Amino acid sequence: MDPITHTLLGAALAQTPLRQKTAYASAALIIGANLPDIDGIAMLADSDTALLLRRGWTHGIATILLLPLVLTGALVLWNLLTKHTSRGESTSLHIGALLGLSYLAVATHPSLDWLNNYGMRWLRPFDGNWFYGDAVFIVDPWMWLLLGGSVFLSRSRRW
């Protein structure tokens, strides 16, 4: 799935009552929905390395369990360094709720990637087999319309 779809899913989740659970809930949902694509950094090396690492380690179950801890730690550290709260979010930071939202957001990423015809490797680093949902294309404007429309309607004051 493309980064726009992952971002729109995180933004759609951030428009639900989940954003009221803790400070930085929206940030955790949007960043977490994109975080497994950190493997895109491999493109700076060379195309063969990027292809080898794509949708591998950072999309595997082991890393899906680790990335939310990293995200939550980064947001807690950000909170300590800035003492900043976003408009429209709770002013208090609840680490347990933030961790739960981070797990939810990070788990959406490989789930969406699995739905397309490119697939992903759930069992990485233990097994390199690819799994495919074959339900949507990697870039799917219908998903953009559905998720983007949901975000737009939730932000609108009137129909």
Image: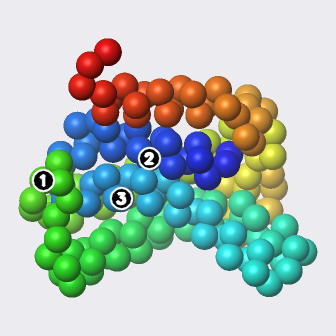
According to the picture, the residue beneath numbered tag 1 turns out to be 90
In the image as oriented, which residue stretches furthest toward the top? 159
- Near mark 1 (Cα within 10 A), the count class, few <14, some 14-19 or many ≥20, is some
In the image as oriented, which residue stretches furthest toward the left? 92
- Residue 58 falls in which quadrant of the image? bottom right
According to the picture, the residue beneath numbered tag 2 turns out to be 10
Horizontal and vertical percent position of residue 24: 25, 60
According to the picture, the residue beneath numbered tag 3 turns out to be 28
Give me the residue at 50% from left, 32% from top: 147
Horizontal and vertical percent position of residue 54: 76, 64
Horizontal and vertical percent position of residue 132: 77, 41
Q: Earlier in the sequence, mark 2 or mark 3?
A: 2
Give me the residue at 31% from left, 33% from top: 155
- Near mark 2 (Cα within 10 A), the count class, few <14, some 14-19 or many ≥20, is many
> Dot 2: what SS?
helix
Q: CA distance from mark 2 to mark 1?
A: 18 Å
Q: CA distance from mark 1 to mark 3?
A: 13 Å
Q: Amino acid at mark 2?
A: Gly
Q: Amino acid at mark 1?
A: Ser
| 155 lies above or below 114 | above
| 88 lies above or below 35 | above
| 149 lies above or below 39 | above
